[in-house]
Amino acid sequence: MSVPTRSDSFTPRVVRPADMDWVKFDAQLARDGSVDPVDKALYAALASFVDKDGRDSDPDPSGEDIPTRAVLAACIGRSVDTVDRATKRLERRGLVRVERRRDPNSSHANLPSVYELLDHELWDERAAARAEARKAARREREQPPQIAPPGSEKPGGGGRMGAAVPLSLQNVSLSDARESDVPAPRTAPEEGERETSSRDEQARAVAAAWTAGTGLPRVPGSERKIREQAAELLAEGHDPAHLASVARWMAAKGWRDLGYALTAPDAPAALSATSEGRQRREWCGECSDPIKRQSEDDEGRVRRCPTCHPLNSRASTLTASS
């Protein structure tokens, strides 16, 4: 009986070459015997298509490496129906989020779905829990020794117990020790800190509006992306209410790029001028003052300045044309 050579050994059939030599695989999923092997195989196949950092597949339907249902079925050697059932099981486990898209040019066709692996969220949560446990253990080790109240020791500090207490602590009273442990009062936050905190809250509200627009369970990774985009746009002077409206609108379309959605011709228009527009609009010098920007008409009625008031349609047109 001859020993099989390397050329005679089994060679796996690669359905589609990958640009990487290895993929990230969740360790707990790999060791969970209750998970169907087909689910693990599909998870591994998806991991070979998603971006290494964002953990999502290419949303461009004309891309070169798109995980269609037929391609995934060929990768794991099963049918398309088996892929659909395994995908739903991975979704229920919170490992995969699938963005199913309709073809805007055909009511009877679908675009390839966008897959996002949510395992990196689990990794972040586990890493944070381990870091917090290490901090708690370090705080416990560094906790200062308890100071005995005055009068609990014999005068002179004699004996073995007295010798164990440093001389610098033998004459410290309990009230002094308590006062030394009281933390210094916190100072009021600086103006820049308050502005940053307010902007963060507004960015979170925009991300929450996007999640509400999807009609799906909350996905922390996707919300973080929208929140980071919103923070950049808010820093540029965009109105938070307008950003929230656009985020909710683009979520229904399956979009996750807030900057791109703002440029879409059918995107919701701002209800009022943005803060950036108000800062650029200069006082015309003809109305009451640069704050109220009101003037009187021929009948003595007070009205908005038609030239420079930020809510006046003519002023908005002048600002846009300039």
Image (cartoon, rainbow, N blue to C red):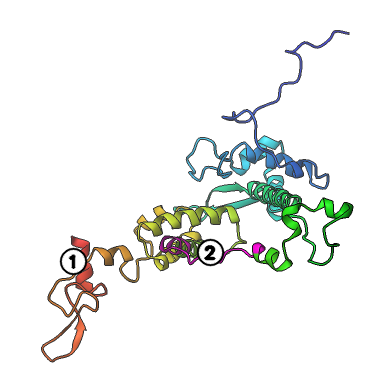
Q: Which amino acid does label 2 sit on?
A: Ala
Q: Name the residue under label 1.
A: 318
Residue type at numbered disc 1: Leu
Asked whether, in this view, residue 97 is left or right of residue 270, the answer is: right
Counting from the top left corner in percent of width and height, residue 56 is at: 57, 45
168 or 44, nearer to the observer:
168
Which quadrant is home to the C terminus? bottom left
Alpha-carbon distance for marks 2 and 1? 35 Å
Please count the marks in the image: 2
Q: Residues within 10 Å of mark 2 (few under 14, many from 20)?
A: some
Q: What element carries label 1?
A: helix
Report whether residue 249 is seen.
Answer: no
Callout 1 crowding tier (Cα within 10 Å): few <14, some 14–19, many ≥20 = few
Question: Magenta segment range?
Answer: 180-197
List x then y, in percent, for residue 199: 45, 62
Vertical side of 11 occupied by 37: above or below: below
Q: Can residue 273 be seen in the rendering of this structure?
A: yes
The residue located at (69%, 47%) in the rendering is 81
Quarter residue 184 falls in? bottom right
Residue with the mark numbered 2: 208
Which of the two residues, 46 or 192, is positioned nearer the viewer here? 192
The mark that comes first in sequence, 2 or 1, is 2
Residue at 60 percent of width and 51 percent of height: 98
